[in-house]
């Protein structure tokens, strides 16, 4: 919702925009990692100059509520400590294939849904925009170890629900059949205790530690196309990363990361 700016009152316009953005973030209307529209587009919608929008966003960046990624845009900051792990957008199945690890995919559900508010916010779509929901299991050595929930902006890939996802991969279809250019994404990892649903799906006891991953993928035009959640049995997999330190006091940069069988 665009704010109704008071253009003749005592409060500067940039401060009104800043207060409106802060309220969107603190109220949860803009969830963590939500991508703001470009400063030019936002300035046009608000009927102000770009410098006014930049002044408001700069304040929130200084407060730690927003983060600006060069060449990517401005995003709502995470409220937890994060450690980047990878530079390549490789799917779990692609990683298994690259390591010649056999696996089987089981499709539990595929449907067109009205997205929950949090998913609609992450995908930057209106609440009534249809989303393709895909729920799958990955089975290795006759044991189920991975549960995956995918949400895809359906107007960008109409008919995607008709594909056989036991034999074809989601990103393979989005790129090959719909000519969508998947450009970049972000992933967040955290340890969780398996709830009853997750425990049943990946054959662990409720409360067992599992690895949880959330992903948000963007197209080359900067628009989000897919967000997903993955739960992985922690006894079977681990995260690995090769890092390089370029001299004393310089930050380390991640060169490679993958989820690999233990």
Image (cartoon, rainbow, N blue to C red):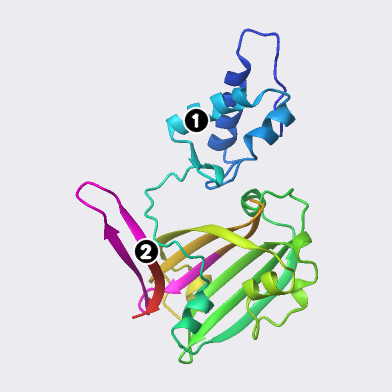
Query: Would you identify the image quadrant in which residue 19 lies?
Result: top right
Q: Is residue 174 left or right of residue 142?
A: right
Q: Which residues are magenta?
A: 229-254
* Residue denoted by label 2: 255
Outermost residue, front side: 247
Residue 42 within the segment the image draws in magenta = no
* Residue denoted by label 1: 60
Residue 232 within the segment the image draws in magenta = yes
Q: Residue at x 57, y 19 (%)?
A: 15
Residues at discs 1 and 2 in contact (Cβ within 8 Å): no
Query: The C terminus is located in which quarter?
Result: bottom left
Query: How would you rate the neighbour count of disc 1 (Cα within 10 Å): few for under 14, some for 14-19, many for 20 or more?
Result: some
Q: Secondary structure at mark 2?
A: strand
Q: Position of residue 27 (x, y in %)?
A: 57, 36
Q: Position of residue 224 (x, y in %)?
A: 64, 54
Query: Would you identify the image quadrant in which residue 63 lies?
Result: top left
Q: Compute the Cα span from label 1 to label 2.
A: 31 Å
Q: Main secondary structure of the magenta part?
A: strand
Q: Is residue 186 left or right of residue 39?
A: left
> Of label 1 and label 2, which has the lower sequence position?
1
Q: Secondary structure at mark 1?
A: helix
Q: Nearer the viewer, residue 26 or 179?
A: 179
Q: Residue at x 56, y 71 (%)?
A: 148
Q: Is residue 87 left or right of residue 111?
A: left
Q: Do we see residue 88 in this rendering?
A: yes
Q: Residue at x 39, y 56 (%)?
A: 84
Above-or-below relation of 189 to 80 = below
Q: Position of residue 56 (x, y in %)?
A: 55, 25
Q: Position of residue 165 (x, y in %)?
A: 66, 80
Query: How would you rate the neighbour count of disc 2 (Cα within 10 Å): few for under 14, some for 14-19, many for 20 or more?
Result: few
Query: Would you identify the image quadrant in which residue 245 lies?
Result: bottom left
């Amino acid at each position: 919702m665009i704010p109704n700016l008071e253009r003749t009152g005592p409060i500067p316009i940039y401060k009104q925009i800043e207060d409106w953005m802060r309220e969107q973030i603190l109220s949860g209307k803009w969830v963590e990692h939500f991508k703001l529209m470009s400063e030019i587009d936002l300035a046009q919608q608000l009927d102000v100059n770009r410098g006014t929008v930049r002044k408001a966003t700069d304040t929130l960046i200084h407060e730690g509520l927003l983060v600006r990624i060069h060449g990517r845009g401005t995003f709502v900051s995470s409220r937890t400590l994060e450690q980047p792990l990878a530079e390549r957008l490789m799917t779990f199945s692609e990683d298994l294939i690259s390591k010649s690890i056999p696996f089987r995919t089981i499709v539990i559900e595929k449907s067109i849904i009205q997205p929950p508010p949090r998913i609609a916010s992450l995908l930057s779509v209106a609440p009534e925009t249809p989303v393709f929901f895909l729920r799958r299991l990955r089975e290795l050595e006759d044991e189920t170890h991975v549960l995956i929930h995918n949400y895809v902006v359906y107007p960008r890939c109409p008919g995607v629900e008709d594909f056989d996802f036991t034999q074809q991969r989601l990103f393979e279809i989005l790129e090959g059949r719909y000519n969508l250019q998947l450009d970049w994404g972000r992933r967040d990892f955290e340890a969780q205790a398996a709830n009853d649903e997750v425990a049943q799906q990946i054959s662990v006891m409720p409360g067992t530690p599992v690895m949880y991953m959330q992903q948000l993928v963007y197209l080359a035009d900067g628009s989000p196309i897919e967000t997903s959640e993955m739960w992985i049995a922690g006894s079977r997999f681990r995260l690995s990363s090769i890092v390089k330190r370029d001299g004393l006091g310089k930050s380390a940069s991640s060169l490679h990361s993958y989820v690999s069988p233990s």
